[in-house]
Image: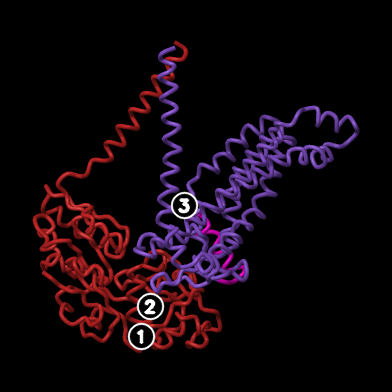
Chain colours: A purple, B red
Amino acid sequence: MFKEKILEKGFFFVAFSSISILALIAFFIFEEGVPLIWKVGPSSFLLGERWFPSQGSFGIFPMIVGSFWVTLGALIVGVPLGVACAVFLCELTPPSVSMVLRPTIQLLAAIPSVIYGFWGLIILVPLIRNALGGPGLSVLAGSLVLGIMILPTIISISEDSLRALPRTFKEGALSLGATHWQTIWRVLLPAARSGIVASVILGMGRAIGETMAMIMILGNAVQMPRSILDSARTLTTNIGIEMGYATGDHRQALFATGVILFFIVMGLNTIALVISGRRRA
Amino acid sequence: MGIKKPLNRVWALAFFILATLLGGCQRPQGGLTVVGSTSVEPFAEALAEEYMVHHSKEKIYVQGGGSSAGIQAVRTEAAQVGMSSRALMPDDRDLIAVPIAYDAIAIVVHPRNPVANLGIDQIKGIFSGQMTNWKKAGGREHPITLVTREEGSGTRESFQHLIMGKTEISLAALVQDSNGAIRQVVADDPNAIGYISLGLVNNQVKALKIDGVEANVENIKKRRYMFVRPFLFVFKTHPQGLAKNFLDYILSPQGQKLLIQEGLVSAATLANSQKGAQPRENV
């Protein structure tokens, strides 16, 4: 009993320290970043289109737009593939096959992002440049790679939510004379909707946060991409690419970029939690 | 018993993590830490290796991180020596900077690009985004892919200062975060143009003549190719002990020879008259 108490305290301490680390990180990001946002003015920081930190222009709007387009592109690539794959694993394949497929898909999550980036840079970028024109380092290349990177998140959570459905749903639909496909499309997918939406939002969080691979294949130009063949810069790559040499206001501006990113990711995670919470209730 | 075993494992793991963390806190004993510009890093590594061959008991640790990070590290005494690939900012003039060599900035294009020479105004036009097609610069009819370094990079600041002047580099330019990455993009894209350290030009890319002057060591020495910047070693106080020995080795004929072999220009050649890029020398 005594031992149990000690352990309980111990685990409480560990859990508490991980939360306090989060609080500390948040505190430092805000402490470094917020003064600059006030100095520049929130609206000219968020909506400014000129990024010349050495001359005192700090506008991150092109990066917000860049993050948005790349993430949207990743979802367009990743969501249909991911959900289809989850349905396939749950409904259309014998257990022996899915026992091989599932670990393979989880392996996708274990590949370091720099490898994805390298693959994109060596294979995808020249392919896009030669076939479609432009510099190749582009929103399209970034979206394709990110779409693959978010697959494991989308597949595993969607699959979980499909498996969590009561057997009666499927049995009921089949016994009413629906075909297997009608059951999947009309009954199972709508019933698992909240879980699938949560998986998409978590995938979105992953896509917005990805840095290394995006530095390698987006080209990082600070411009509004006008087509999917244009280069773009995301919020994360802005920090990643410039932190090595940044000092003073420039460094604070990168922290301020982190503040904006913090809010976006917090927002997404909250939405995901609310949706998956509603599913349980 | 059923509970006990895994618990032992938990404690072992906790102990292991703690031990690793504490172990990681230990600083290398008695060595010299050199931190800074990624442009200088490969040269400093080569020098450190060579130095340690002759002085096997002494240890020199070379790390990258960027010019500003290196200067910051010297200021906070996290490192004894900082490396910078640009002249010091006015704020940093209290530190001691010693040029160990000079490096030129070369404008590079794909080897198959028919353009071999650009005027300085053409370069300004291209990098500011006003000239967007190779045809206007005497090349093929094709849009130019512009590649630049990130804001804050020593190479970018030197390029801005030496070539662009007050003209801004176009925001539509692709941004890469190292000389090597720029060289890779230019080597892959037949329509790309970028700028890198002359010492890193190889047969994957072609260095352009600027106003008819070829970028090579000979022309730098004759002061005909003017786009030259210093590679600095930065100290907080006058270097002593190992730091002084290492610096003396680098500035010795032996060390300088090594840098010249790597494609740089020796510190002595240009020491007194680099206008604009000249750092204050206290040693």
Q: Is residue A126 left or right of residue B270?
A: right
Is residue B59 visible to us here?
A: yes
Residue B179 sits in quarter:
bottom left
Mark identifier at residue B107: 2
Circle 3 Cα neighbour tier, 10 Å, few/some/many (<14 / 14–19 / ≥20): some
State the SS at label 1. strand
Circle 1 Cα neighbour tier, 10 Å, few/some/many (<14 / 14–19 / ≥20): many
Query: The magenta stretch spans which residues?
Result: A117-134
Q: Position of residue B192 (x, y in %)?
A: 47, 74
| CA distance for labels 3 and 2 | 28 Å
Q: Is residue B37 left or right of residue A94?
A: left
Q: Position of residue A31 (x, y in %)?
A: 41, 54
Mark identifier at residue B63: none
Q: Residue at x 38, y 83 (%)?
A: B166
Q: Residue at x 45, y 22 (%)?
A: A8
Q: Which residue is mark 1?
A: B210
Q: Is residue A123 magenta?
A: yes
Give the camera-side residue of B8 and A91.
B8
Check the residue under mark 3 and report the chain it is in: A
Instruction: From this view, report whether residue B196 is shown above or below residue A242.
Output: below
Instruction: From this view, report whether residue B132 is shown above or below residue A235.
Output: below
Instruction: Check the picture and name the quadrant holding the C terminus of chain A.
Output: top right
The dominant secondary structure in magenta is: helix
Q: Which residue is mark 3?
A: A114
